[in-house]
Amino acid sequence: MWRVTDGSGGEMRDGLRGDTGMAGGTQGDRHGTTQSTSRRGFLGGAVGGALALGGAAAPGSGVVTAPEAAAVPRRTTGKGRRAARRVAVLGGGVAGLTAAHELAERGFQVTVHERKPHGLGGKARSMDVPNSAHGGRKPLPGEHGFRFIPGIYHNLPDTLRRIPFPGNANGCHDNLVASTEVMLARTGGRENIRFPFSSIGTPPPVLTPDAFLRLLTGQLETFTRLPAHEIAYFANRMLVFFTSCEQRRLDVWEHTPWWRYLRADDMSADYQQLLAIGMTRNIVATKAEIASTRTVATCGEAFIFNLLGRGADGEPDRVLNLPTNEAWIDPWVACLRSLGVEFKVGWSVRDLTLAGGRITEAVVTDPQGARHAVTADHFVQAMPVEHARATWNASVRAADPQLVRCDRLETDWMTGLQFYLTEPTPILHGHINHIDTPWALTAVAQAQYWKDRDFPADYGDGTAADCLSVDISEWNRPGLLYGKTAKQCTREEVAREVWAQMKAGLNDTGAAVLRDATVHSWFLDPAVDGLGTPHPANDEQLLIHPTGTWFNRPSSRTAIPNLFLAGDYVTVDIDLATMEGANASARQAVNALLDEDGSSAARCEVQRLYRAPEFEPLKADDARRHRLGLRNAFDLG
């Protein structure tokens, strides 16, 4: 019998029996502020990257850092600064906390305003499952979606190292745990595809175009079993992108859908599912038919270099060794408090007042609904784009056209659901991409990574032994059980449908990997509301990347001198809605603020994605060809 936990906050109750068969350069700063980010990256791409290569990664070299940071010590006492200036950080997610961290270290007086009472950490936070704690144990750990911190990230890991954690020499960074493989779960009795990260062997010391093609082709032949001509074509398309200059990436590939770039219409169903759809819809909730090639292929580029051990912070697939708040967010907030940061949680930004060309106040409501005027010298708006743009009134929008363009940015649903199981069910030491599922599911069994926790002894009522965390990326396609979209289903129907779709990929070859009898309860992100009604809503959506998205993303500095933007929708080197992008954008915002303030404090270091030196001459040649109107030298069409 399923005992289900209603993610909307309702009490645990008995459910029906679960035997149903049941994720080139920076856009120039228009005001002259140096920004040191320029190319793009990818969130759940360990799956996509492993699709191309399955190899171990080691920390690499060659990461480009902000030039001003190289000449100044990483931390500063603020020597020579005038009296502390006040900064209002609007939003307490990864971007807001990063901005607060960097500003507080530089002596600014910082107050963070976060709209949700328990929302510090934003979409990255974990949360307590209501009414699940018994016998002195902690509540079961829920979350918006599982954490994934790949080796292509550099800015976020730097922040993690600077957050103290008891017993860790490198702070919260030491709480990262590497996975050893990923899996593509196929349905219909087809064998699942597993990619051990050790499979790549020793990469070539010099990555020539020929060596690249042989390496990629060999890995695809080993793991995908696609027709040889399809493998050869895909490998060529990746080489074309790897050797494309930044301007071609912007002028051509940003406007080219990934589906068309791969000529998916002309290929087999497996080619479409594995190489086109699997790297877009399942990972970032963007359909391959409309996703920007520049965004998707940059993810592939970054992860392939990570797998080759080049320019990486660590292994391609890393998770935390505890629930997110325990491993990261709570220590971070404690660290910021120790630096003097003040927090106002449950305070929502309603409006920004513009007078004399500057923001004079932010109008906010407190937890009781009373309105207040927040004044400060500077404002860092670190809210998700769908919430930030609701606070930009006509005067604010008229002051900066890039804010108006943000209305064209699109968001979609990518939401987490956790199953708590009565038996340890690790399945795989890594992430699982349920690549054939209608709802584009990705999952990870988490308790296997929490070595310092005895799950049944530490959480819940003592009978839950594991947490299987699932991301749902497609909410508008009919499912298997009810023939309804996820938005049309009730919360319990969503849980049953997700379980059925996972079983279709894991149990279809005879093994009972997932058993209905082991389901203790489930928890669906409470940001989702109104399921099964005509008006479903999601309060925490994800920026998606149709073609042309880059040109509607704003810079961190605005035309309003004391208003700065931070968030995963801001233009940064990693061109995708990620924690890394949120962190990097906050560093950019702080640098712009320091410039505007005339501060002598060290600028934030903003690290860029790795660039292979072997390909730079080829990119230079491609820049010449692009100016002449010629295609890339390797482009066979």
Image (cartoon, rainbow, N blue to C red):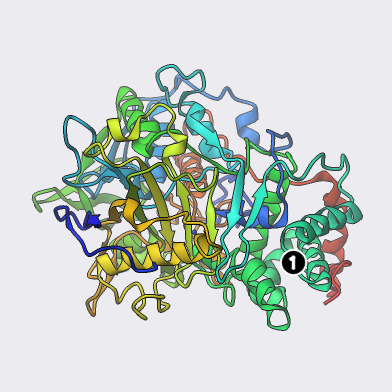
Q: Secondary structure at mark 1?
A: helix
Determine whether 581 is above or below 606 in the image.
Answer: below
Residue 632 x %, y %: 84, 68
Q: Quadrant of the N terminus?
A: bottom left
User: Front-most of 95 and 398?
Assistant: 95
Single out the residue that lies furthest toward the front: 510
Q: How many marks?
A: 1
Residue 176 x %, y %: 51, 33
Circle 1 residues within 10 Å: few <14, some 14–19, many ≥20 = many
Q: Quadrant of residue 623?
A: bottom right
Residue 237 x %, y %: 78, 67
Q: Quadrant of residue 529?
A: bottom left
Q: Is residue 455 left or right of residue 47?
A: left
Residue depicted at 58% across the width and 71% down the height: 291
Determine whether 30 is above or below 203 in the image.
Answer: below
Residue depicted at 10% across the width and 53% down the height: 369
Q: Quadrant of the C terminus?
A: bottom right
Q: Amino acid at mark 1?
A: Arg
Residue depicted at 75% across the width and 43% down the height: 308
User: Front-most of 376 and 7?
Assistant: 7
Instruction: Confirm whether residue 354 shows in the render.
Output: yes
Instruction: Confirm whether residue 562 shows in the render.
Output: no
Which residue in the structure is indicated by mark 1?
248
Residue 62 x %, y %: 74, 37
Q: Is residue 254 left or right of residue 493?
A: right
Determine whether 131 is above or below 349 in the image.
Answer: above
